[in-house]
Amino acid sequence: MDSLSQQRLSAVLSASYSDAEIRNALQVLDSRFTENSTDSRRQLRVDVQAEVIRSNAHIVREFSKISEVL
């Protein structure tokens, strides 16, 4: 195991499941990630990035509505 993998593993293991953000992230990941393969990990990354882009676009549209009113 390389040092980056060890650092990631240490970070995950040091996170407390009682932390609400960690717990919510694990629940979302559990619902989206059903198979641990290279393709499924890649697809998960693509799906999350697409969701972030859609969310950011929505925020920009909402701010543009506000700027039109002002």
Image (tube, rainbow, N blue to C red):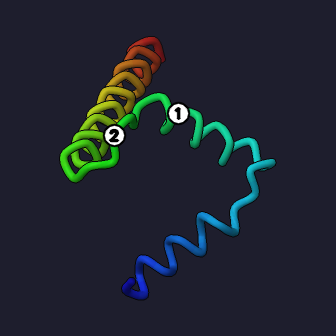
Q: Position of residue 42 (x, y in %)?
A: 22, 48
> Residue reaching furthest bottom?
3
Please state if 43 lies on the left or on the right of 63 as rendered.
left
Residue where numbered disc 2 is placed: 35
Amino acid type at mark 1: Val
- Residue 63, image quadrant: top left
- Residue 45, image quadrant: top left
- Relative to residue 30, is residue 16 depicted above or below? below
Residue 28, label in figure: 1
- Residue 34, image quadrant: top left
- Relative to residue 41, is residue 2 depicted above or below? below
- Say which residue appears at 59% left-offset and 34% top-offset: 27
Instruction: Please tell me whether mark 2 sits on a helix, a strand or a loop.
Output: loop
Q: Position of residue 48 (x, y in %)?
A: 34, 38
* Distance in Å between CA atoms under marks 2 and 1: 14 Å
- Say which residue appears at 39% left-offset and 83% top-offset: 1
Viewer-nearest residue: 53 or 7: 7
- Say which residue appears at 33% left-offset and 40% top-offset: 35
Q: Position of residue 41 (x, y in %)?
A: 29, 48
Amino acid type at mark 2: Glu
- Disc 2 crowd rating (10 Å Cα; few below 14, some 14-19, many 20+) is few
